[in-house]
Amino acid sequence: DTGVSQNPRHKITKRGQNVTFRCDPISEHNRLYWYRQTLGQGPEFLTYFQNEAQLEKSRLLSDRFSAERPKGSFSTLEIQRTEQGDSAMYLCASTPVAKNIQYFGAGTRLSVL
Amino acid sequence: RKEVEQDPGPFNVPEGATVAFNCTYSNSASQSFFWYRQDCRKEPKLLMSVYSSGNEDGRFTAQLNRASQYISLLIRDSKLSDSATYLCVVTHYGGSQGNLIFGKGTKLSVKP
């Protein structure tokens, strides 16, 4: 499978716990994006990387959220001290050089109890 | 007010019907425009880009009116498999940059 891969697919956690999600983009895609989607809404941008550099962060990305892409390949999104309002689908997308098409992974569905 | 507005539907249509979705965007600096399709509990997938001259892909036709900041999608001869949520998407950048800005989506249900 050469698509965008996200793990885990589902995560159930208790309020206050930390969670980390992983995204493996399509090989050689230099841009990687994180979005969040809640029920009945379209995806909302969180942050994006060009190679290992984090170039933009949405104001949705509170201090409890951190994203990394240490070697310009896979990326992780960590949420500290989770809140019930963090429950959502977290989507990762990647884009090849000089293309404006984003390819999405299947997402990680987070439920905070 | 959201930057990209869509009628949430749902649109319930019989097979073979023609259905049109509308979308408006508020930022006149928006550069690129798309329709994405999202099946229930799945990821969004690009349906088609939208160009000022209008473009067609089989049964699907997309139109862009920059002056009115309006985007449309027309589906002809709808199939059961067209049932999905259709997301109107803009970016503020051309080329290979920029995050996507999504509308809430319009849900389509095609019935036999």
Image: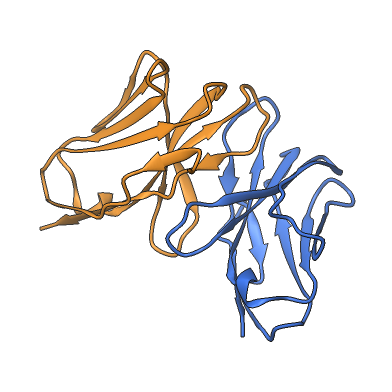
| Percent of width and height locating residue B72 | 32, 30
Left or right: where does residue B10 sit relative to residue B69? left
> In the figure, residue B95 lies in which quadrant?
top right
Residue A96 drawn above or below residue B10: above
- The chain coloured orange carries which letter? B
Which residue lies at the image location 84% right of the left edge and 51% below the top edge?
A: A69
The image shows residue A52 at horizontal and vertical percentages of 86, 44
Which of A31 and A57 lies nearest the eye of the viewer?
A: A57
Color scheme of the displayed model:
by chain
Name the residue at 64% across, 58% down.
Answer: A5
Residue B16 coordinates in the image, percent (x, y): 10, 44
**Rendered view: A13 above or below B8:** below
Q: Name the residue rendered at 59%, 40% in the picture.
A: A102
Residue closer to the observer: B26 or A31: B26
Q: Using residue B21 as the reference point, say whether residue A65 is left or right of it.
A: right
Residue A7: x and y in percent read 67, 67
In the picture, which chain is blue? A
